[in-house]
Amino acid sequence: MLNVDSIPKAEIHLHLEGAAPPDLVAALAAKKGVDLKGLVQNGRYVWRGFSEFLAAYDAAAAVFTTPEDYEALTRSILEGLAAQNTLYAEFFVSPDHAEATGVSWAEYLGAVVRAIEATEKTHGITARLIPLCVRGYGPENAKRVAELVAKTAHPYVTGFGMAGDERMHHPRDFAPAFDLAREAGLKLTAHAGEFGGPESVAVAVEHLKLARVGHGVRASEDPALVRRLAEEGITLEVCPISNVVLEVYPNLAAHPFKKLRDAGVKVTISTDDPPFFGTTLTRDYREAAETFGLSAEDLRGITRTALEAAFCDEPTRARLIKRLDEAPLAS
Ligand code: ADE
Ligand code: ZN
């Protein structure tokens, strides 16, 4: 039996607000007199289908109204990840969501950075930040967010990305935002190939010049695109359980993780919005291992792929890979 707990892990597709524990959201809502309208029941988020998920996500995010709330949230997530033997985590942070609750980008960033610095000291976990624009808010807003982020030049802000409903707008419309972010030295990723087909991945990679794709799994439906992803070394941030819970695939056995990996595409394992999908990083690693026939060595290799694709500076990457290589082999 594989001891997945002790495998060193890396998480490169994780939304900060999407990782909020339901009990924390319920407690903050009660304290602030916010009516969650049944969002949290018996300690779980209740929603059905992708559109309702996005609305549930927004409702949960809306209870974080102070920098202290974000600091506590970030700390609790990082402590949970450290307890799962996670060496490295990248958070997608959303200036739009913070601003919607009255917290400026500078305050939001300051709070999250304080939590990262504290948990690096106490728990030895390293984290970096990828601010996102929300696709449904349109290209003009994306450019505004990119400008805001590009002005920051904080060493922990290492990437720029886009989430939201990929069926809205065309990637070419977001090229000015992504060009601006790239010119500011940020590495790029965007959600595509989740609810859009392979062409959605192809145009996102093309127009936004992505180093990684969030999900990207529907690329598996186009052999030429699979070859291209493999040749260009574009990493897919795969979130297997998210894809099943959001009904992109009926079950893990139908998931193309193995097909993509066997074709030479760089694939990693992450969680997306773990409490919304009833998962943890350990559970995603474990179920992927069981379903796709991965050994402990394969799982360590997947962590290595994630660290190689991480949006961090080279000394940080070298230090993390050394920690992975020096971690004892699972029994
Ligand atoms: N935002 C948070 N999770 C997401 C997902 N799985 N797809 C698109 N946008 C998201
Ligand atoms: Zn996501």
Image (cartoon, rainbow, N blue to C red):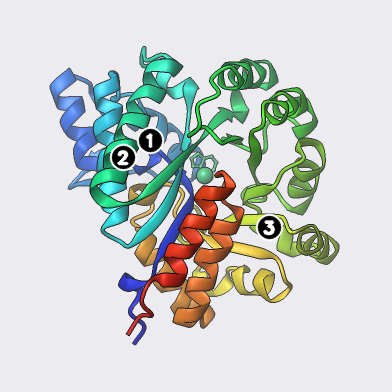
Which label number is shown at residue 118? none
Residue reaching furthest to the right: 224
Q: Is tag 1's residue or tag 3's residue first in the polypeptide sequence?
A: 1
Is residue 37 something one can see in this rendering? no
Describe the element under mark 1 as helix, strand or loop. helix
| Residue at 20% across, 34% down | 26
| Residue picked out by circle 3 | 218
| Residue at 61% across, 63% down | 267
Which label number is shown at residue 17? 1
Task: Residue 261: give x, y in percent of width and height.
Answer: 65, 71
Residue kind at label 1, given as amino acid type = Glu
Viewer-nearest of labels 2 and 3? 2
| Disc 1 CB within 8 Å of nearest ligand 1 atom | no
* Of the pair 318 and 244, the residue shown nearer to us: 318
| Residue at 71% across, 31% down | 182
| Residue picked out by circle 2 | 20
Question: Left or right: where does residue 318 sit relative to residue 9?
Answer: right
The quarter of the rendered structure image containing the N terminus is: bottom left
Indicate whether 185 appears above or below 103. below
| Residue at 39% across, 57% down | 87
Describe the element under mark 2 as helix, strand or loop. loop
Instruction: Give the alpha-carbon distance from disc 1 to disc 3, as whole Å.
Output: 25 Å
Question: Left or right: where does residue 14 sit relative to residue 121?
Answer: right
The quarter of the rendered structure image containing the C terminus is: bottom left
For label 1, count other residues whose C-alpha is less than 10 Å away and answer few (under 14), some (14-19) or many (20+): many
Q: Is tag 2's residue or tag 3's residue first in the polypeptide sequence?
A: 2
Residue kind at label 3, given as amino acid type = Arg
